Amino acid sequence: MSLLFIAPDRDLSSWESAIQDIDPNIEIDIWPAIKDKERVQFAVCWNHPQHLLDGFPNLKAVSSLGAGADHLLSDESLPESVDICRVVSPSLVQQMKEYILAAVLNIQRNFVQYIRQNDQRKWQPHNHPSPQELQVGVMGLGELGKPTAKQLAQLGYEVSGWSRSAKEIEGVTTFAKTEELHPFLNNTHILICLLPLTEETKGILNLDIFKQIDERGWIINAARGEHLVDEDLIYALDSNILQGAWLDVFSEEPLPDKHAFWNRNNVIITPHVASITKPDEVADQIVENYKRALSGLELNHKVNRELGY
Ligand code: NAP
Ligand code: GLV
């Protein structure tokens, strides 16, 4: 039986060795070099070519190589009978906490402006708010959003969080469901998106939402590019509805040369690096789920196909 990796834009050699360090008996295929399609029972995918996954008659389960599984769920060729799981790891959580904290601190302390001023040899101090004066709203309180919200609250920020089901998180004012989206957004200075990409959340970062957060607020999107309506962001920035945007993810990656987000003082771009799956930190859970799939056991970190995450 074989475990297949499909990740066209990744060097998978370290994945192969990380899996074999745990269990040297696992047979590994790396797409497109597949020895025998009938032997493939488990696949690990990242941005796989769509319409590929129905070509393996004995495929039992597919794992995302990362935290998000939207790239798997959007592939209509994935048979209903195939279970989907994803990766959840302390390292992904830690990296996301660092990324969001770095962005929030840079915004709070005006470093974005100071770095731009460096280029102009401009000596111009700006006032900055204390953490207690900054209302930070976290959309999505799952594996990544909840610890991120908690960390910000521990550092003294005024934190609110929004999720599908109601939550209780120490130091965080929580809201749930569409009905509570408006009160959640009220007074928010920095809006952070850590939602999964689903039918319900696609395009959620739009003009209507931008108008509901604090005037001259910021958004930070470290979830998926399709959460954001690009034209609405440009309009909101140009109309002073928003002060700035900190973006790690984009509808098209790499962000095309001609995209309107480049070369703007008020848009910070990072190349989808907020939280990166490291092979040696998650190989054990991939092996565990591979063995579970082969034995017909319930997968860990299984994705709910109906909810879309
Ligand atoms: P998760 O554990 O599945 O958590 C998702 C959270 O979103 C949950 O709190 C969920 O609510 C909430 N949610 C889902 N649909 C909602 C809706 N319609 N309305 C309100 N709340 C909703 O996901 P995660 O592991 O934290 O990861 C989140 C996303 O981050 C991933 O899907 C991925 O796209 C992105 N990501 C990006 C990077 C990067 O490097 N930029 C790295 C890793 C992950 P409930 O708690 O009620 O279920
Ligand atoms: C990265 O974007 C992930 O989903 O892990």
Image: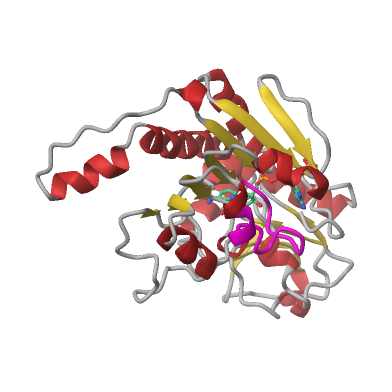
| Rendered position, 75 above or below 269 | below
Which one is in front, 37 or 118? 118
| Rendered position, 137 above or below 218 | above
Q: State the image coordinates of residue 271 (x, y, percent, origin top left).
A: 41, 57
Q: Is residue 282 visible?
A: yes
Which segment did they paint magenta? 194-209
Q: Is residue 10 left or right of residue 284?
A: left
Q: Is residue 105 left or right of residue 43?
A: left
Q: State the image coordinates of residue 194 (x, y, percent, origin top left).
A: 62, 46
| The image quarter in which residue 126 lies | top left
Residue at position x 84%, y 64% from top? 82
| Rendered position, 82 above or below 195 | below
Residue at position x 55%, y 32% from top? 135
Which one is in front, 96 or 57? 96
Figure quadrant of the N terminus: bottom right
Which one is in front, 277 or 174? 174
Figure quadrant of the C terminus: bottom right
| Rendered position, 231 above or below 178 | below
Residue at position x 75%, y 66% from top? 73
Which one is in front, 189 or 249? 189
